[in-house]
Image: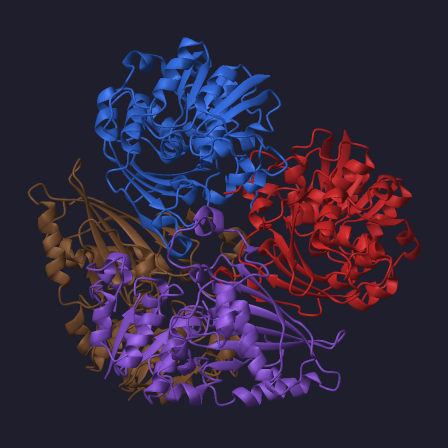
Chain colours: A blue, B purple, C red, D brown
Amino acid sequence: MVKVGIIGASGYAGAELYRLLLNHPHVEIVAISSQSYEGKMISHLYPSFYGVFDMIFTNDQEVIEKADMIFASLPHGLSEKYAKQCDEQGKKFIDLGADFRLDQEKDYQQWYQHDYQYPQLHEKQVYGLSEVNREQIKQASIIGNPGCYPTSITLGLYPLLKNHMHKDEKIIIDSKSGTTGAGKSLTEDTHFPKCNESFHPYKIASHRHTPEIEQELSKMAHQAVHVMFTPHLLPVNRGIISTIYVPLKDNVDFDDVYDIYQKTYQDEYFVRVLPKGQVADLKFVQYSNFCDISLHYDERYHQLIVVSTIDNMVKGAAGQAIQNMNLMYDLDEKEGLMMIPASF
Amino acid sequence: MVKVGIIGASGYAGAELYRLLLNHPHVEIVAISSQSYEGKMISHLYPSFYGVFDMIFTNDQEVIEKADMIFASLPHGLSEKYAKQCDEQGKKFIDLGADFRLDQEKDYQQWYQHDYQYPQLHEKQVYGLSEVNREQIKQASIIGNPGCYPTSITLGLYPLLKNHMHKDEKIIIDSKSGTTGAGKSLTEDTHFPKCNESFHPYKIASHRHTPEIEQELSKMAHQAVHVMFTPHLLPVNRGIISTIYVPLKDNVDFDDVYDIYQKTYQDEYFVRVLPKGQVADLKFVQYSNFCDISLHYDERYHQLIVVSTIDNMVKGAAGQAIQNMNLMYDLDEKEGLMMIPASF
Amino acid sequence: MVKVGIIGASGYAGAELYRLLLNHPHVEIVAISSQSYEGKMISHLYPSFYGVFDMIFTNDQEVIEKADMIFASLPHGLSEKYAKQCDEQGKKFIDLGADFRLDQEKDYQQWYQHDYQYPQLHEKQVYGLSEVNREQIKQASIIGNPGCYPTSITLGLYPLLKNHMHKDEKIIIDSKSGTTGAGKSLTEDTHFPKCNESFHPYKIASHRHTPEIEQELSKMAHQAVHVMFTPHLLPVNRGIISTIYVPLKDNVDFDDVYDIYQKTYQDEYFVRVLPKGQVADLKFVQYSNFCDISLHYDERYHQLIVVSTIDNMVKGAAGQAIQNMNLMYDLDEKEGLMMIPASF
Amino acid sequence: MVKVGIIGASGYAGAELYRLLLNHPHVEIVAISSQSYEGKMISHLYPSFYGVFDMIFTNDQEVIEKADMIFASLPHGLSEKYAKQCDEQGKKFIDLGADFRLDQEKDYQQWYQHDYQYPQLHEKQVYGLSEVNREQIKQASIIGNPGCYPTSITLGLYPLLKNHMHKDEKIIIDSKSGTTGAGKSLTEDTHFPKCNESFHPYKIASHRHTPEIEQELSKMAHQAVHVMFTPHLLPVNRGIISTIYVPLKDNVDFDDVYDIYQKTYQDEYFVRVLPKGQVADLKFVQYSNFCDISLHYDERYHQLIVVSTIDNMVKGAAGQAIQNMNLMYDLDEKEGLMMIPASF
C-alpha cells in the first residue's frame, strides 16, 4: 500500500484526489492538510463524504511526516518548500499547482511574478503528461502535474506536432472550461444568478497557462510553436473543451493525420480518438479520466480543427496526478481510474 | 411624471426596479442610492445597463430630497427612518423589505428580533398585495410590499379562503425559489459548482415569511389560518412556484372551486387562472408580472392542490411595487408592466 | 463470475446498469438486448462507452440463453413473459419496470390498465427494497426493483412507520426528480429551451408510483397508510428529493424520532441519516448509491419533515438492482457500488 | 398602425416576433399562420401567451391578404413564392429564413442545394443588417433578415474591415449559440439529459452561415474576406457569442482600432462598444436587441480578438426584423425594442 498524503486538501483538486483515491486498491490515505480548515472534518466542507471518509484536516508537516507519496494542491509559490523537504527525505512529490511546470525560471518570473527558491530542485522536475512523458515520470521524484487547459491542448496536438504535419504558423486555441476550474472560492463570476445562462472569455491573451502550452508544444515539435490561447467560462460544473485551429502542411492530407492520431494513441486507454464524423463533447468524458479527441478538416483552407475534451478535475488535475503516481510506483496505470462517464 | 427615487438600489430588487421603470412612460428616476457603491455608476455593478442608464449611486438623503415617490430595498430594520421622513414630508414610500408587512409588532419582534422605532407610523402601513388590497393601496402613503413567497401563496389561496371553501386544517405549502431570491451577496449555496445540479430545502419551519403568510391568509379567511411552509432553492435564476395542499370542505366540489377562482380573478390582468388540466410552470411567468395559478384535485382525499407561480423579482418584488405605485398615482395599473414572458 | 444479461438495454436504466456493472469484480456481462437497436453498438447510442464497452445489442432471447442473472428494463406489461422463462429455467430475474412491484393484481389493473398474464408467478416476487427486505431478497428468484420515487419515500419513512411514531393521518409527499427520470425518449417537457430554467409538477394525484408507495408504507406500518404524492420535474440531470410532511403522535418527541432513525440505519452503508441541523441535498448523492435523509421538526405543529434524496438512476434504479443481485448471490452488498458522490 | 402578418408563426422566431410586436405602439398584428397548427390557439403551443394574445393560427394566404407588412419564418426554399406575391401586391416582405440573404444564386445552390424560383425577385432583396445597410433598407420591399451567427460576426468586424485595418489573412471565428438557435423541433442534441452540462461544436467547416458571413464581410472590406467559422452548442437558452481572431495590419495599433469602433457605432443605440478592459458576456444582452462588442489585443502576435454578443432570437432574428420594419416605415428605429437586459 502506498502511504499517500495531500497538502492543501480543502480545495476542489484536493477533494477530487481523495474522492478517487478512496477507490484505489493500493493506496492508503494517511493524512490530509488544510491551513484554513485544520481540525475540521472533510464532511464539514464536502457533505458528500459524510460517513464515507471523515478524516480531519491536519497541518502540512504532519502530512509529510506520515506519507511517502505527497500530493500538493496549493497556490503558486507555496509548493517548493514542501517539494524540497520531500526530496531531502526521499519521498515522492506531485504538485498539482504551477510551481514545477515551467522549465525556465524566467518564464515563471514573467508569468507568475515569482522567483524560484530552490533553482536546483527544478532540475529534477518532470512534466507529468502521462501519455507523453511516461518513461521519465516512472523515474521521477518530483512531478509538475499539467494544468487543465494544457492537458487538453497538448494531448490534442501531440501526434500532429511530433510528426511535423502542421504548417509553421500560429495556432489558435479557443478553450472553454466548466466552473470547477475557477475553484472553491466565491467570486462574482461564479455567483449562480450571474453565471447561470452566461458565457464569456476571460484573461484574453494573458492566461498563465500560455507559456506552459507553448513550452510543451515546442518540445513535441522540436521547434518553437506559437499559440493564441483564449479561455472561456462555461456554465457547467465539469470539463474543458479546446477547439484548436491548425494549418496543415501542403503535402499532408487529412486521412494521414487521422491515421497518425489513431496510431499514436492506439495503446493509450485514456485517450480516445473518435471515429471520423463524430464530435467530441464534454458530456462523454465528465467524471472520468478520458481525453476524447475528434478531428475535423476544413478543405477550403486545408486546416485541421482538433476538438479535445477532458474533465478538468480528473484528467485535468486529480486523475492525471493519480495516473502519474501509478507510473511512479509501477502500478497498473489505470488503477483507481476506471470510472466510466455517463452519457446522461 | 412621477419623480421616483430608490434607496438601496444596488441589490437585485433595486436594479429590477429601475430596469422596469425605465420603460414606464410616466416616471422619471431622479436619484438612486447605495451605501456600498456611492459614487459608482450602475454599469459598474450591472453591465447590462451600460449605455442605457448610467446614473451614479448617491446617498439616501439625496434620494428623499429629490423624489416624491421613494422605493426602499433594504435589510429589515433600516427602512423605518426613511419612511418616517417621507411621511413627514408628504412623500409616498414603498418598502420592498420586511419592515412594514407585519400588523403586530410582537410578530416582528419574534421573527426579526427587532422593535419598531416608530410604532405609530405602522398604523399607516398598507400591505401591498395589489389585487387584494387595491382600494387601501390607492389611499396609502406607506406600503409594505409583500414578500416573494407570500405573494405566490396569498394570491394562490385568496379565492378559496375568502369563500370559506377550505376545511379548517393546517395548510402545507411546499415552495421553490430561483436563486435571485437569495440576493446579490456571494454565498456557498449560490456558488455555481455547488448550486448547479443541486436542490434542497432551507430554513425549514423557520422562514421569516411564515408569519406574513399566516397573517394575510387569516385576514382573507376571517379566521386563523395555519400553514407549514417549506422553501427550497431551485437552480434557476428566476421564479417562485408554490405547491399548496389544502383539504376542501366536505360539501364543496372542485368545479365550484375552479369557478370561484375564475370569477375572482376574471378582471385581473396579472393573475391568470389556467384552464383545467394545464399545470402552472415557472417558465411561463419569468420576467413578467404575471401570477399563474393552476388548480388540481385529489379525489381520493378530497384535497385541493394549488400551483402558483410568479417571477420572484417582478410580481414578487419590483413589479408589484410598481403596480402599487401605479395605484397610488391613479395610473393605469399595467403601466410599465406589460412584459410578455417567453416560453423559451 | 455471475453471468449477467440485460433486456431492454438501450434505455437510461439499462445503460446505467452496464456502466456500473463494468466495475463489478464478480460480474461478466454476457449479452444485452434492445428491440430498437439490435445490431448496433452501445457507443452508437451512448458515445461515453466508446472504446470501453462496445458490445452489440442482441435480441431478448439470446440474453436469456446466455445469462444466469437477467435484468429487464422494459415498459410495463413486457417483463412477465421473460420472468416466466427465467423462472422455468432456474435463472434469476430482476425487473426494473413496474410488473413485479404491486402485490395485488387489482392495483396493477387499476393503475396500469393491464392484467397479469401469469398470476402465480407473482407469488414468487419480492419487493427489492434492499435495506428493508434483505432476507427475502436473498432467497428470491424474481425481484420487483422499486420505483425511483418509492425508494426515496419508503426509506425516508421506514423507521418512523415501523415504530408507529406517526399520527394516523394522511402524509403529504412533495417529490422532485431530475430529467433522466423521464427517460431517453424526446418529449416537449425535456426539450432544453423549454425545460431549462423551468419547474412544474406533473401527474398530480395520478402518478403510478402512488399505489406502490402506499402498499409498502402500509406494510411497514402494519396498517393502512395514505399519501398524497406530487412529483415535479427539476431542471437537473440526476436525483430525486422528497420533502415529506408527517404529523407525529402526541407523545413522541423529535429526539426520539431522530434516535430511531439513527439506530435503524446504523449498519446500513447506503443510508445516511444526516446530523441534526444539516439538510439533505441532491448534490451529495448524485452518481452514488446513497440515500441521504435529513430530519426536521416543526414545533408549532408537532410535525416531522423528512427530506430524502437519492440518485434516481442509481439507488432509484440500476444501483439498487445491483445491490439486490449482490444479495441474491451472497456477495458483499457494496460490490460495484462504492462510487463516492462529488460535492462539486 | 402597420398591419402586420406572420407566416410560419409557430416556430421560435415567429413567436418571438409577436411577443415583441405586442408592445409595439404602431403595429397591429392582423394574422399569423402555421401549416402544422392551423386552427389552434397560440397558448396551446406557448402557454406564456395565455390570456395575453390568443390569436388562432390561420393559413398563409390569409396572412398575405390581411397584412401590409409580412414577416416569414420558414425553412429555406419556402419563402420565395410569398415574397413574389407580396411584391406583386405592393406589400413589404421580411424573410427571417435564408432565401434572400445570398447575392449569388450559385452560393445558394451550393450551400442550400436549391435553385431560385424567381431570380429577378432577388435583385430587389436587401440584406437587413440594420446598422450597416440602413439607407437601402428604408427603400426596400424585400429584406433578407440576417442569420443569427452572421449578425454577431458582421457587426463585430464592420468597423475594422471597412477601414482596412486587418491583415489580408484568414479570420478564425469560434461562435457559441444557445439552444433556441436549434429551434422548436425535438432533437437528441437538445434533449435535456444530454444537452445539460454538455458542450460541443457542430457542422464544423460546413455551416450554411459561412457563405453569408464571407459575402457580407467581403462587401464591407471591398475585397475577398475568408473565414473559418465553427459554431458550438451552448447549454443556455439564449444568446450567441463569437470570439473572432483577426491579425492586424502592421502599422495599425490597438488604440486606433478601438477608436474606430467607438466612432463607427457612437450613434447606434443597439451596438455597444464596451470600455477597454471589459469583456462582453451573453448575460448582458439576453432578451434585448443589443449587440455588445468588446475588443482585446494580443500584443505578442499583434492580433485583435473581437468578442461580439447578441440574443440570437432578438438581434439575431425577430428584434432585427422589427428594427428593419421600423426603418421601412420611417418609424423610430427603437420602437418596440427598448427591452433592457437583466444582469441576473
Where, by quadrant of the figure, is residue A250 drawn?
A: top left
Which one is nearer the viewer's eye here, B307 or C35? B307
Which one is nearer the viewer's eye here, D92 or C237? C237
Instruction: Tell whether D244 sits left or right of A327.
Output: left
Q: Quadrant of the N terminus of chain C?
A: top right
Instruction: Tell whether C93 sits left or right of D77.
Output: right
Query: From the viewer's perspective, is residue D242 above or below residue D135?
Result: above
Seen at 12% across and 46% down, the residue is: D254
The picture places residue C15, in percent across and down from the top left corner, at: 64, 44
Where, by quadrant of the figure, is residue A34 drawn?
A: top left
Which one is nearer the viewer's eye here, B113 or B128? B113
Seen at 50% across and 34% down, the residue is: A15
Seen at 81% across and 52% down, the residue is: C163
Q: Residue furthest right?
A: C120
The picture places residue C169, in percent across and down from the top left corner, at: 77, 67
Which one is nearer the viewer's eye here, B89 or C143? B89
